[in-house]
Amino acid sequence: MMILQQGISTYILAINILLALAVVFLERRNVAATWSWLMVLLFIPIVGFILYVILGQNLSRRKLYKWNQREYEMIRTLTQAQARRIQDGRMDFRDPQMQLYKDTIYMNVTANRALLTQNNEVEIFTEGNSKFASLLQSIDAAEHHIHLQTYIIQKDELGRQVIEALTRKAKQGVAVRILYDDIGSRTLNDRFFREFTAAGGLFAAFFPSRIPYFNLRVNYRNHRKIVIIDGKIGYIGGFNIGNEYVGRSKRFGFWRDTHLRVTGSSVHSMQGLFLRDWNLATSTTIDYDLFYFPAIEDMGQGQVPMQIIASGPNQKWSHIENTYLKMIHTAKHSIYLQTPYFIPDESLQNALRIAALSGIDVKVMIPFDSDHMFVRWASLYYVGELLQAGVKCYLYKKGFLHSKTIVVDGMISTVGTANFDLRSLKLNFEVNALIYHAETSQHLQQIFLQDIEDSQELTKLEYDNRSLWHRLMESISNLLSPIL
C-alpha cells in the first residue's frame, strides 16, 4: 500500500510539473495569471490539477472553427479589398464624420474580418415586451429559414411561446435551427423540444457536458444572442429568452436591456457567425448556400454604417476588448457606459481613468442590485477607484440593468452581448454591433441620460465613507474577480 501511494504521489507530482511547464512555456498568459496557476498546481497538487483541467485550460491557441473554404475565400477577398481602400483613402464613407474612426474600422476589418457595411437600418429596444413582440412578428413572417442563438432559454411562459412560434414555422416547411449554451440553459432537455423536432426543427447545445453535471469547458461559454430570419433580418443584443426578460420575475422586476433589430448587409455577418457556431456545435453541418446570404440589393436601403465584432477564446486577440479600448481612446467629449458587471482589466480601467483625468465626461451605470453578490462588490471596487479620477457612477434602481452599451461623443456606439468584465472579454464567445452613426448613437446617449433619472449617483464622498464591512467584501471580491 505504501509503495502504491508513493507511486501515485510521484505520478501526480510529475503531472503537475508538466502542467506547470505548459503554463509557463505554452500558454502565453500574463505574468499574474501564470504565477497564480503555478502556485495552485504546486501547492495543492490534486485539487490544483482538477481546477486547472476545469478552469485553466486555454482555448485561445486552438483552431476551433473550421472555416468553410468558400466563405473563407470570400471574406478574405472582401476584407483585404476594403482594407486597401481605407489605407489608400479610397473608401467611400457615406458620412464624412466616419473619417474620424477609419483606424477603428481598419483594425476590425483586418484583425476580426469584420466588414463595414453602410446600408443598415436599426431599431432599438430597451424593454422585453416590445422586443419579443417584434421578434415573434418577424418569426411569423419568415419564409425560408430562422436561425436563433441564445445563452439562456427558460422553460417558462415566454420560452414556450417562442418555441411554439418556431414549431409552427417548422411545420410550414421553414428551416428552423436553435443553438443554445449548455451551461446557460442547463435545465433544457429533449422533452422541451419534442414537438419542435417532430415538426422538423433542429436544435443543438454549445459545448455540451459529456458527463452529467460536469463540464470540462465550463469556463468557455457561448454568450451570443442573435437571430437571423431569411438572411435579411437580424436581432442582436442582451435579451435572453425567459419570463424575467419581460419583467415577469418577482426577484428582478423590470428588466432594462438593450437589443437591436437590424436590416441590411450586416445581417450577412451575423449569419456567417451563426453558421460557424452551429457547425462547431453539431455534426449537421450547414453549407454556405447563397439563399442564406440574399443579394445586396435585396438587403435594405438604410444609412447606418456598422461592423459586427465577434470575440472568443478561440481567437488570438480579444477583439471586443480592443474595440472598447479604441473607442475610449478616441473620445473627445464623453463616454457613457452601461453594464451589469463592471470588472475591467487593468488596460480598460486605466483607459477610463486617463479619459476622466483628461476632462472627458465619463459616466458609468451599473445595477443598484446585482444578480451575483460577489460581482456587485467587485464592480463597486473598480468603480470606487474611478471615482477618485472624476468618473461619475450611477446605480440603476428601476429594475435590473442588463444593458451592454457604450456611446462615445454621441458619434460612435456599441450594443451587444459583451459585459465590461473579464469573463465576457477573455473567456466567453460574444458578439457586438459597432455603430458609426450619429443619429443612432445620440439616441442611445439620450436613453442613457433618461436612465439616470431612475438611478442613484454614487458620489466619491459616499464611497469614501462606506463601512468596514463594505471594504472587506470589496477586497475579497476583487481577489475573486478573475473567475467571476
Image (spheres, rainbow, N blue to C red):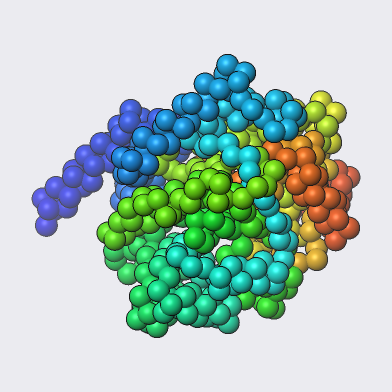
Q: Is residue 157 above or below residue 142?
A: below
In front here: 484 or 209?
209
Residue under the point 60% across and 30% down? 105
Residue under the point 46% across and 26% down? 80
In front here: 362 or 13?
362
User: Where on the picture, by quarter, is residue 461?
Assistant: top right
Count of numbered circles on the image: 0
Q: Is residue 419 above or below residue 356?
A: below
Q: Say whether residue 449 is visible.
A: yes
Percent coordinates x, y for residue 133 in the rendering: 66, 72
In the rendered image, the residue lying farthest to the front is: 297
Q: Is residue 249 above or below residue 276?
A: below
In this rendering, position of residue 419 left or right of residue 337: left
In this rendering, position of residue 190 left or right of residue 325: left
Q: Is residue 98 above or below residue 312?
A: above
Percent coordinates x, y for residue 321 in the rendering: 58, 38
Residue under the point 33% across and 40% down? 70
